[in-house]
Amino acid sequence: AASLPPPPFLVNKMISPNDGAQVRVGVRIRPLTPKESSEGGKAVVDGNAFDRTVTISNRKFTYDQIFHPNVTNPDLYRSVSPPLLNAFLNGYNATVLAYGQTSSGKTFTMGSEAHEEN
């Protein structure tokens, strides 16, 4: 299968699917909801795709991949799933897990008919 080029929101510092890592962690930073914006909410999480860090206040965390609020679900899927699908088709186990607090965007990211856009 042909590999897909990285989407434009990801810089070429992506972790190689052949790097031997058993677990990779990506962070999707969700945008503010219209309600949060209308009530004066401010984004408090800053992601840097180049150095794969997320900054909250003065704390910095490093992950394998960072997905900014403007990433689409199809782009996120295309950047995450090919190595997992290839491994699965070659007999390995593969899992995608969404973890986060209530209203952090898990269902939206993993897909749900309730969030389809027409």
Image (spheres, rainbow, N blue to C red):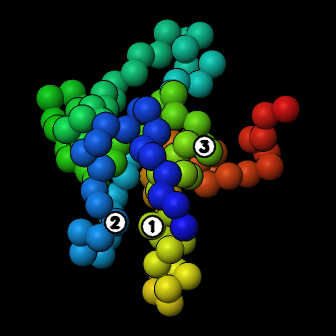
**Cα gap from disc 3 to disc 2, whole angstroms:** 20 Å
Left or right: residue 39 compared with residue 64: right
First reached walking from the N terminus: tag 3 or tag 2: 2
Residue indicated by mark 2: 17
Q: Give the SS element for disc 1.
A: helix
Q: Please say if the residues under marks 2 and 1 sit with CB atoms less than 8 Å apart.
A: yes
First reached walking from the N terminus: tag 3 or tag 1: 3
Most foreground residue, 100 or 68: 68
Q: Name which residue lies at 52% across and 34% down.
A: 71
Amino acid on which the number 1 mark rests in the picture = Pro
Amino acid on which the number 3 mark rests in the picture = Asn
Residue indicated by mark 3: 73
Most foreground residue, 85 or 100: 85
Q: Residues within 10 Å of mark 1 (few under 14, many from 20)?
A: some
Q: Please say if the residues under marks 3 and 1 sit with CB atoms less than 8 Å apart.
A: no
Give the quadrant of the C terminus: top right
Q: Give the SS element for disc 3.
A: helix
Q: Is residue 32 above or below residue 80?
A: above
Q: Is residue 71 above or below residue 16?
A: above
Amino acid on which the number 2 mark rests in the picture = Pro
Q: Is residue 13 above or below residue 2?
A: above
Considering every residue shown, the one lying at the far right of the view is: 118
Residue 57 lies in quadrant:
top left
Residue 83 disc label:
1
Give the quadrant of the N terminus: bottom right
First reached walking from the N terminus: tag 2 or tag 1: 2
Q: Give the SS element for disc 2.
A: loop
Q: Name which residue lies at 55% across and 42% down.
A: 75
> Mark 3, mark 1: which one is toward the viewer?
1
**Cα gap from disc 3 to disc 1, whole angstroms:** 17 Å
